Image: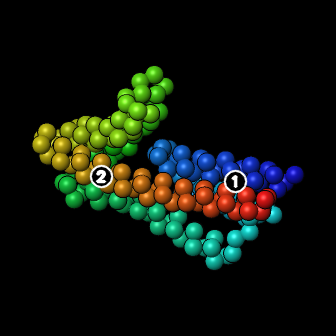
Amino acid sequence: MTEYLLLSLGAICVTAGVIGSVLPALPGPPLSYVGLLLLHWTRFGRFSVGTLIIWGIIIVIVTIFDSVVPVWGAREFGGTRAGVWGSAIGLVIGVVLLPMMGIMLGPFGLLGILGCPFIGALIGEMCAGRGSKNAARAAIGSFIGFIAGTFMKVAVSVVIAVYFFMAFFKAVF
């Protein structure tokens, strides 16, 4: 019974980890890693200590890079922290608030997911006192850095999810 509870919690963590890789409110890769650990503690998935350590190191690196890459992108294009925050707030609006209001903006809300972080970065830069030309350039940098960080998190979380479910199905079937 405990194994099934751990398995269920692990699947929830891995799924939440993939979702959290896109939503700034959830720590995606760490959640995915917790799901992998939970599977490890069942008979369904046994991973070597080395594998778990390597994944742990990858999670720490991606988590650090997720904080550094958007700031780097903004700085490379002359942006400020306000642009990075604006980009993150824009993503929340694009992913959570617009669909709740029934506004999808394109196929599956892709325009909201990609456009809102850019618009948020632009607004953040303009609120920081940047002129429109400098704000647009900085918003592009913030957006590129934000997308790069998000892509890293999604890639790691999806690979862990695949790893999780492959180990589970291998043990079951």
- Residue tagged 2: 144
Q: Position of residue 98 (x, y in %)?
A: 42, 28
Mark 2 or mark 1, which has the lower sequence index? 1
Residue 143 in view here: yes
Q: Looking at the picture, tell me which residue is in the foreground, 31 or 19.
A: 19
Which residue is drawn at the image coordinates 48% and 54% (left, top)? 154
Where 5 falls versus 105 (above or below)?
Answer: below
Check disc 1 and report the residue beneath it: 10
Relative side of 147 to 23, left or right? left
Q: In the rendering, which numbered label is found on residue 92?
A: none
Specify the amino acid type for callout 1.
Answer: Gly
Q: Amino acid at mark 2?
A: Ile
Tell me where residue 42 appears, x and y as whole percent.
79, 62
Tag 2 secondary structure: helix
Give the SS element for disc 1: helix
Q: Residue furthest bottom?
A: 50
> Which quadrant of the view contains residue 89?
top left
Q: Percent position (x, y) of residue 85?
A: 34, 45
